[in-house]
Image (tube, rainbow, N blue to C red):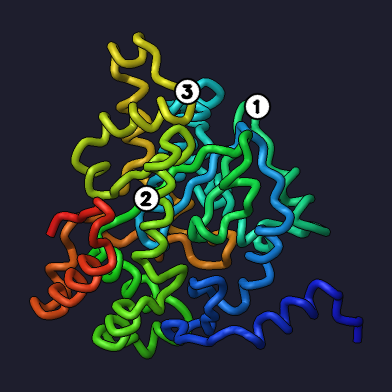
Amino acid sequence: MSAISDETQEHIELLSSLPKGNGWGLADLCQYQGFWCASDRLGSIVTFQKEFKPLETDLILATLPKSGTIWLKSMVYATVNRVRFPPASEKHPLLTTSAHDLVPFLEYYLEYGTYNSFSDFNANFQSPKSRLFSTHVPYALLPESVKNATNSPKIVYLCRNPKDNFVSLWHFFNKRGSNITNPLPLEKVLELYCRGESWYGPLWDNMLGYWKASLETPSKVLFLKYEELKKEPKFHLKRLAEFLGCPFSLEEEENGGTIDEILRLSSFEFMKNLDVNKNGITPLKFRSNIYFRKGEVGDWKNHLTASMAERIDRVFEEKMHGSGLLFDA
């Protein structure tokens, strides 16, 4: 049997010292630096914190799970690479490759291939202009090189109404592991969610971290809401492109074709019906189709009782009080 590396031993010792939580029927959670993460991902998160060497041209897409992650990845990838890969092209990478492959998660680097170190992973993803990465990690847990350096990369954060986020999480976790045959009771996970014991939560702290950073450094952190993006996709796509440093030209805006094609290519219905998203396997070893359910705003009304919805609203109103961050009912 091979010896345990010093780094692995350090992670094992750290894990043993942390509070443990309910993993929603899957991997156990541990509370690390105030947030809940999967115990089996702790080592990769710590390594990401210590070893990530960002470039000023990097772009990091941050989300809570089930808040429009694939939508944001697809939209940004298509926008940043629209000269190299015209969005109407029949050979566009998004037609045959999962957005999770094209924009990899920093904290899941071990899932994307065989690398001797995080540095190997970091160097493997290159682009003529900007490297694109993603993360579910809260702002507080990001490396200091991302948060405080003068040459830090730009971050786009997308969040979602807590009630829709909760319902989407519940459905997603019921499509995995033993939950498929033994679904999680809605009332049980609602209790966990409302006390902050959820993946990369407390959810309110995850949102507030990026919200405050966007107010303090708006040139570095762009904060988006799923519902607003749904309501005015063209307006927010233009805003997104401007923030990313690749604004649409006057010609692109006037003829509208490029913008419309990007929105079509990254739309929920179009992505859901691609073979790669119906039958593929993601780098995290999940079936791609479990990421696509409805993508609707307000679907929580079909699942939550009035008292359940009121409870979520009450918790978030209390936690968000005074922040200026609000969600429609």
| Residue that sits furthest to the front in the current view | 322
* Mark 1 and mark 3: Cα distance apart in space: 13 Å
Q: What residue is shown with label 1?
A: 128
Q: Residue 42 carries which label?
A: none
**Disc 3 element:** loop
Nearer to us of marks 3 and 2 is 2
The residue type indicated by label 2 comes to Trp
At a point 45% along the width and 38% down the height, the residue shown is: 217
Of residues 243 and 320, which is closer to you in this image?
A: 320
* Mark 1 and mark 2: Cα distance apart in space: 30 Å
Asked which quadrant contains residue 316, the reply is bottom left
- Residue 206 at what x, y percent from top left? 41, 61
Q: What residue is shown with label 3?
A: 246
**Disc 1 element:** loop
- Going from N to C along the chain, the mark reached first, 1 or 2, is 1
Q: What residue is shown with label 2?
A: 211
Q: In this view, does 286 lie above or below 48?
A: below
- Going from N to C along the chain, the mark reached first, 1 or 3, is 1
Nearer to us of marks 1 and 3 is 3
The residue type indicated by label 1 comes to Pro
* Mark 3 and mark 2: Cα distance apart in space: 23 Å
